[in-house]
Image (tube, grey):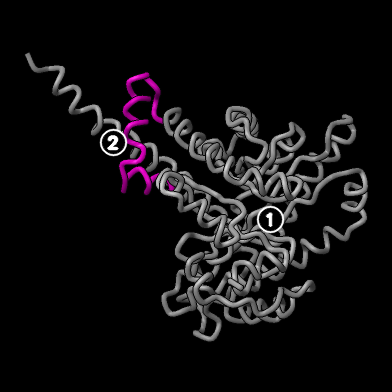
Amino acid sequence: MKATQQLHDLGQSLWLDNITRGILNDGTLQRYISTLSVTGLTSNPTIFDHAIKNGDFYDDAIRRKTAEGKPGETLFLELAIEDLMRAADLFRPIHDRTGGVDGWVSLEVSPLLANDAAATTGAAAELHARAQRPNLFIKIPGTPEGVAAIEESIFGGVPINVTLLFSAAQYIAAAEAYMRGIERRIAARLDLRIDSVASLFVSRWDVAVQDAVPRALRNRLGIAIARRTYREYRGLLASPRWRTLAAAGARPQRLLWASTGTKDPAASDTLYVEALAAPDTINTIPDKTLSAFADHGRVNGVMPLDGGDAEAVLAEFTRAGVDDTTLAAQLQREGTASFDKSWKDLLDRVAAKRAMLVQPDRATASKP
């Protein structure tokens, strides 16, 4: 039995952190679903940027939409929605079979709206309505400014993937925003089946401290933070507040492990996938990590409900001079800035591709 199937059997969903028109057209995504137990996917601007830069899968659509006068951001969002609608349809049987628990895809709102909760809420609702797919999450960053947009979006009936979480405290803030949205739906007598996931970024912790801690502590911080967060997640699901919501018909906001590709070439290429095996969670991983785990990964047990050695490991980092509270806030700020840059780079990429594709047409039109 493949290790990917073993993860599935212990109750963890394995999602692909990639979406391109290429893997849709050539059957790669369908193969991942059929043979590697992939049951959903996530996307981000950098993925689309690389796909547009390194292939011609989008050229005809960009040329056509440019001729229709579509501006850059509108054009990109149409491309992304088209791809994610196709992916959502591939995952729809899984979504239906699991009663909506699994089989999701994710689309990001513009990170340039991150400091405007009302604009983010409006954009999330618009994107979800345009896609017309029940298994599409809209990604909203779990920043202090984003928390209000998360609550409003859940209250408004939009499924949300909370992104850019780096600590247990940031996760709790996102989870409470989700519960407030559900509680408001109870008060308004609305349907409570509004789904959400909360995405904790893992490997970026280890990249941040790699050169600042003893070798014995390398590649251990992200896993310790994940274990602490998993303890809080399980505790929240056992809390009286959540049990009241569950009894009313609400569905739990699932914890998702993000940024789980190994960045350190000296470490195992399946390090985070193996360490983060845990029931009732999701792990979203890039193609390379998926292939590595399917080839030689191992499921060596599950994450302890109580966080295991998380606090002891984090105490070692404290003694080494790492303040995880301060670093969590820094990583979230840097992540937000990185998402902004990626979005702007993507729009620049679309503009450059548009200019390249229409150039021959203009040259031909100028000939006598």
Picture disc at residue 145:
none
> In which quarter of the view is residue 21 placed?
top left
Instruction: Name the residue: 65% across, 41% down.
Output: 135
Dot 2 falls on a residue whose secondary structure is: helix
Query: Taking 314 as reference, is 326 above or below it?
Result: above
Element carrying mark 1: helix
**In the depicted structure, whether residue 197 falls above or below residue 89:** below
Q: Nearer the viewer, residue 324 or 215?
A: 215
Q: Which residues are magenta?
A: 46-72
Asked if the magenta segment contains residue 88, the reply would be no
Question: Where residue 352 is drawn, which disc sits there?
Answer: 2
Give percent across and percent down for residue 77.
48, 33
In the image shown, does 366 or 201 lie closer to the viewer? 366
In the picture, the disc for residue 170 is 1
Q: Is residue 53 magenta?
A: yes
The amino acid pointed to by label 2 is: Ala
Tell me which secondary structure the magenta stretch mostly adopts. helix
Specify the amino acid type for callout 1.
Gln
Camera-nearest residue between 102 and 325: 102
Q: Identify the residue at horizontal 72%, vertical 77% (top origin).
A: 311
Give the residue displayed 66% in from the left and 59% down from the top.
13
- Relative to residue 236, is residue 248 drawn left or right? right
Gap in Å between the C-alphas at discs 2 and 1?
37 Å
User: What residue is at 32 percent from the left and 20 percent from the top?
Assistant: 67
Q: Taking 172 as reference, is 296 left or right?
A: left
